[in-house]
Amino acid sequence: SHVMMRIILVGLGNVGQGLLTLLHDKAESLQQREAFSAQIVGVVTGRRGTLYHPDGLDIAALLDAAARGTLDAYPDSPALRRDLPALTLIQEAAAEVLVEASPTNFTDAQPSLDYCYTALETGKHVVMANKGPIALAHDELMRRAALVGKQVLFEGTVMAGTPSIRLAREGLRGAQLLSVRGILNGTTNYILTQMENGLPYADALQQAQALGYAETDPSGDVEGWDAAGKVLILSAALFGHPRRLAEIDVQGITHLTPADIESARAAGERWKLIATLTPHAASVRPQRIPITDPLAGVSGASNAITYETDTLGGVTLIGRGAGRIETGYALLTDILSLPRP
Ligand code: HSE
């Protein structure tokens, strides 16, 4: 039977716009193939206020307002509210799901974490691309979700729309996960690839920002914290072992020079920012790996993850790990996989 999902969207940056673009462009095929349609009933932004319309906001007009950088550009209509505080909107809007796509912060994950708790308390599922809440409070989110019979899904927090979480949770269900090794940050992998092509670091970083790969504050990417946050997520979600950022051995790529890149190349090697996770240890550090290592062939904003298991040996997934549409797509797959009301 046909389902209509009413969505509250937090964050109207690259990722939020990516989801809106997909909902807009795929409306017909989602209707036909998935018997699914969606309404965006509310939008919450960090500094640009909120929008609420009980019958759904116009997605094309929202994308236009987002491109202009102001919700003021969204056209008025009788039932439109522009004045609701974020928490009031999340509490009171009739909606099935809260989509969290605001910028990640690994310090306290606020205000996003409270948005998630409030959504659950008022009977909404939570789907997130924002890594903060799940990295810092995975277990508490799951506990609260179970209490109210709702789901918290977060495919987009690791490798964007490339289904890293779903592969581990569904495809590897009967296997025991022994370790994880991968390239989990698109920005740094893109920078390293461009530096191999002879581009200076600063130009490569600028390109990664323009392409929508980098975080709002890109120091989180280049210093390794974004990949480390993803390690926290995998540790809590797949190993049942919540860790703190301070427990991870983290090193970024900011100290790598063109000479380092060149000397690796001359030796038939390549620098990659590698994340490693076992039940006992977790790290993120640049490593010089031989060109024959499968991870050496992962270039640009692509990411890769190898799950070592007791039963299947290694299972490797490679795909895009960052980007507007790529991450919007993760939100879409999570929304589509929610139980239907
Ligand atoms: N800034 C992140 C990256 C986005 O570059 O991988 C995806 O989480």
Image (tube, helix red, strand yellow):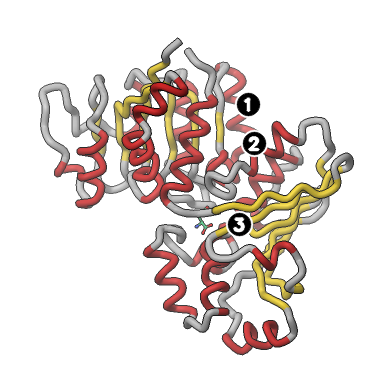
Question: Dots 2 and 3: beta carbons under 8 Å?
Answer: no
What is the C-alpha distance between the residues marked 1 and 2? Answer: 20 Å
Position of residue 44 relative to residue 95, above or below, is below
The amino acid type of the residue labelled 2 equals Arg
Between the C-alphas of marks 3 and 1, the distance is 30 Å
**Residue on which disc 2 sits:** 166
Query: Which quarter of the rendered picture does the N terminus lie within?
Result: top left
The amino acid type, in three-letter code, at marker 1 is Arg
Q: Earlier in the sequence, mark 1 or mark 2?
A: 1
Q: Earlier in the sequence, mark 3 or mark 1?
A: 1
Amino acid bearing label 3: Asn
Quarter-wise, where is residue 96 in the image? Answer: top left
Q: Could you tell me which secondary element the residue under label 3 belongs to? A: strand
In the displayed orientation, state which residue is furthest to the top: 1
User: Distance between the Cα atoms at labels 2 and 3?
Assistant: 16 Å
The residue to which callout 1 is attached is: 143
The image position of residue 308, as x and y in percent, is 81, 48
Q: Secondary structure at mark 2?
A: helix
Residue 303 image label: 3
Q: Residue at x 58, y 31 (%)?
A: 141
Label 3 CB-ligand 1 distance < 8 A: yes
Expressed as whole percent of the image width and height from the top left, the position of residue 150 reads 54, 20
Q: Is residue 221 visible?
A: no
Q: Report the front residue among 153 and 164.
A: 164
Identify the residue at image location x=34%, y=44%.
17
